[in-house]
C-alpha cells in the first residue's frame, strides 16, 4: 500500500486535478464523499486520457465528477494480496483506495501487490 494519495472535491476541474496529481506525484485522485452516506470516487490518469483527451473535451471545463468512477472499488488493509490481485483482475482495475473505519488510509496498485505484498509473504 502506498501512503501517498490525495483526496479531491468532485467539483474541481480536470486541469486542477492534473496539477494536484503532478505536484503530489500520484497516479490517481480519490474523490471525497459528499456526505456520510455517500461513497468515494476515483479518477485514474488513464481515465483523463480516455474520457477527456481522446474525446477532445476541455480539461478546464470538465469537472472531476463527470469522469470519475463511483463508487470506487475499495480494499481493506488486511486483505490478503492474492485476493486483492484477484479482485483487481475480476473487475479490470489497476489500483484502489484502502479504506479503514470508513476513511482512506492509502492506495494499493498491482505494483504494491507484487513488490511489497509478495515479497513480504516470501520472507
Image (tube, grey):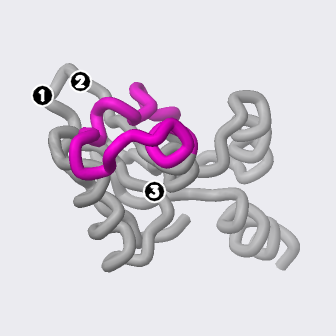
Q: Does 22 sit above or below residue 14?
A: below
Q: Is residue 96 visible?
A: no
Give how far across and how far down residue 5 sits, in percent. Answer: 37, 64
Give me the residue at 37% from left, 54% from top.
29
Q: Within 10 angstroms of label 2, few (less than 14), some, or many (20 or more) residues?
A: few
Q: Could you tell me which quadrant the N terminus lies in?
A: bottom right
Question: Which residue is most to the top?
Answer: 37
Q: Determine which residue is flagged by label 2.
A: 38
Give the residue number, with chain letter if any, for mark 3.
28
Where is mark 1, residue-wise?
35
* Magenta residue span: 50-73
What element does badge 2 sit on? loop
Question: Dividing the picture into quarters, in which one does residue 115 lie?
Answer: bottom right
The verdict on residue 59 being magenta is: yes
Q: Are marks 3 and 1 in contact (CB under 8 Å)?
A: no
Position in image of residue 28 (x %, y %): 45, 56
Q: Where is residue 49 in the image (x, y as percent from the top left)?
A: 54, 50
Q: In this view, does 29 lie above or below 90?
A: below
The residue at the point 49 percent across, 48 percent down is 53
Report if the CB atoms under discs 2 and 1 are less than 8 Å apart. yes
Which image quadrant for residue 52? top left
Quadrant of the image containing the C terminus: bottom right
Q: Which residue is more in the foreground, 69 or 46? A: 46
Q: Which of marks 3 and 2 is nearer the N terminus?
A: 3
How busy is the neighbourhood of tag 3: few (under 14 within 10 Å), some, or many (20 plus)? many
Label 2, label 1: how far apart the Cα atoms are: 5 Å
**Left or right of residue 79: residue 72:** left
Amino acid at each position: 500500500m502506498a501512503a501517498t494519495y490525495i483526496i479531491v472535491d468532485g467539483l474541481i476541474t480536470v486541469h486542477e486535478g492534473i496539477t494536484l496529481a503532478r505536484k503530489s506525484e500520484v497516479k490517481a485522485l480519490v474523490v471525497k464523499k459528499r456526505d456520510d452516506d455517500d461513497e468515494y470516487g476515483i479518477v485514474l490518469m488513464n481515465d483523463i486520457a480516455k474520457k477527456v483527451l481522446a474525446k477532445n473535451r476541455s480539461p478546464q471545463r470538465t469537472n472531476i465528477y463527470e469522469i470519475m468512477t463511483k463508487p470506487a472499488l475499495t480494499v481493506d488493509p488486511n486483505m490478503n494480496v492474492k485476493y486483492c490481485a484477484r479482485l483487481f483482475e475480476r473487475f479490470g482495475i489497476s489500483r484502489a483506495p484502502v479504506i479503514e473505519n470508513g476513511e482512506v488510509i492509502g492506495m494499493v496498485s498491482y505494483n504494491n501487490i507484487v513488490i511489497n505484498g509478495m515479497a513480504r509473504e516470501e520472507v
